[in-house]
Image (cartoon, rainbow, N blue to C red):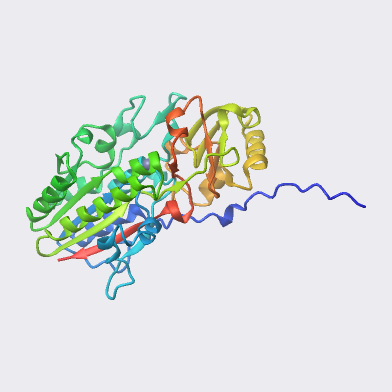
């Protein structure tokens, strides 16, 4: 009897990876579309079928993906009433952008630019100037914000054009570099409680004939990371945030549009060896790698000089059935980071980029003990992470 032939692993073809809808339906398109509708010059409305409003409010719920809302009608009755199942609703999914992570998405929202231009293309990325990893969310080590992200935010452009502009968020974020590069322009109002944020957002919205107000809530993401999507703690947060959205919707002044969106969705990762591949314990994956960046489901891999080809080959062979594994130029050509890559951003992208297809992560138990222990994760191109709501309420 003939022996079964050895089966070489067949890597996922890169053209099977869903590419974010930059330029027509991504987070980067939202504020330019709203501000263009308010007459702010130099911006283009790229999301179709959004009727311009004099007063626009964006409520960004960290970590609440489109598919999670759809799966939880009982916990989110108000958000559900805005889904396109009801007659006349414009609610739809848009894409976050790659990677589907908070720092990247908030920069896309605030600048109105894809990651290849705003230059925050990951949770941690290499700073080509220093050769060290930089955490984009915590902005560590400190890097001059305006050098890292030189573009004006849409808030700044709107404010300069006479639109009353405000961000209502946690007081902790008022002075952070991420706020400075992504979410500044007009006035920042720090409020501790979710209820206060909704009330102040409604007041700021009413404070101008034309207004653009952003508000934010983080703990759906926090509970998802810690306990998992669909845990009791996560469901409790969903119920709470559903109430917040309704509270804000009920206070909208005339001529307003409220848009409820998110920075990414989330997926639970099983605690087993197949699902959690520990880079720090894997000599094969570590060979030739100088720095591991990104996060579990969206890795930037920086090779030692000359080893780029070998690292790509090994990563593709070992991981290619569970991850889309691309060279930097392949990921760029596929459009993962947007249509344009600024020169200063090119070297921030890994020599190899690995984006999870299955419910798997590449952890780093030694260097990233906190992140590696999380239950819920995000970062990749799959619909559960990538699709975020764009739900509309008008007054
Ligand atoms: Zn998160």
Q: Residue at x 42, y 48 (%)?
A: 266
Q: Residue at x 30, y 57 (%)?
A: 75
Give residue 84's quadrant in the image: bottom left
Toward the right, the furthest residue is 1
Above or below — where is 190 with respect to 267? above
Which x, y percent locates residue 322?
Answer: 60, 47
Which x, y percent locates residue 224?
Answer: 38, 44
Whether residue 267 is visible, yes or no, is yes
Nearest to the observer: residue 128 or residue 19 = 19
Nearest to the observer: residue 18 or residue 85 = 85
Q: Residue at x 91, y 51 (%)?
A: 2
Question: 246 left or right of 130?
Answer: left
Nearest to the observer: residue 292 or residue 336 = 292
Question: 67 left or right of 60?
Answer: right
Which x, y percent locates residue 183?
Answer: 24, 42
Give residue 38's quadrant in the image: bottom left
Above or below — where is 187 with respect to 387? above
Nearest to the observer: residue 248 or residue 117 = 248
Whether residue 120 is visible, yes or no, is no
Q: Which quarter of the rendered picture does the C terminus lie within? A: bottom left
Displayed-image quarter of ligand 1:
top left
Q: Residue at x 45, y 25 (%)?
A: 132
Which x, y percent locates residue 142?
Answer: 33, 25
Question: 178 left or right of 293?
Answer: left
């Amino acid at each position: 009897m003939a022996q079964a032939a050895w089966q070489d692993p067949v890597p996922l073809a890169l053209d099977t990876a869903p590419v974010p809808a930059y330029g027509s339906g991504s987070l980067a398109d939202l504020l330019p579309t709203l501000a263009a509708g308010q007459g702010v010059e130099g911006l283009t409305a790229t999301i179709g079928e959004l009727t311009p409003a004099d007063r626009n409010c964006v409520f960004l719920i960290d970590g609440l993906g489109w598919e999670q809302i759809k799966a939880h009608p009982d916990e989110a009755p108000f958000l559900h009433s805005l889904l396109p199942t009801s007659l006349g609703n414009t609610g739809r999914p848009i894409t976050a952008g790659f990677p589907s992570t908070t720092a990247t998405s908030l920069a896309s929202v605030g600048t109105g630019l894809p990651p290849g231009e705003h230059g925050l293309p990951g949770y941690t990325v290499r700073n080509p100037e220093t050769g060290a990893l930089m955490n984009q969310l915590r902005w560590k080590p400190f890097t001059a914000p305006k050098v890292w992200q030189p573009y004006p935010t849409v808030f700044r452009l709107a404010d300069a054009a006479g639109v009353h502009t405000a961000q209502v968020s946690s007081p902790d974020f008022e002075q952070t570099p991420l706020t400075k590069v992504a979410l500044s322009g007009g006035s920042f109002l720090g409020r501790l409680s979710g209820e206060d944020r909704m009330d102040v957002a409604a007041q700021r919205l009413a404070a101008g004939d034309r207004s653009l107000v952003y508000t934010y809530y983080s703990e759906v993401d926090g509970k998802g990371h810690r306990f998992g999507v669909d845990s009791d703690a996560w469901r409790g947060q969903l119920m709470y945030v559903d109430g917040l959205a309704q509270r804000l919707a009920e206070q909208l002044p005339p001529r307003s549009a409220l848009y409820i969106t998110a920075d990414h969705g989330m997926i639970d990762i099983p605690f087993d060896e197949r699902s959690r591949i520990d880079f720090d314990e894997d000599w094969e994956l570590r060979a030739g790698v100088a720095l591991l960046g990104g996060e579990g489901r969206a890795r930037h891999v920086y090779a030692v000089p000359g080893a780029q080809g070998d690292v790509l080959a090994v990563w593709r062979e070992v991981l290619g059935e569970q991850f889309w594994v691309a060279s930097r130029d392949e990921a760029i050509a596929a459009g993962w980071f947007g249509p344009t890559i600024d020169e200063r951003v090119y070297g921030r992208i890994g020599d190899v980029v690995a984006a999870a297809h299955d419910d798997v992560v590449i952890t780093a138990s030694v260097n990233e003990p906190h992140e590696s222990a999380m239950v819920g994760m995000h970062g990749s191109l799959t619909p559960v992470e990538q699709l975020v709501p764009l739900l509309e309420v008008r007054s």
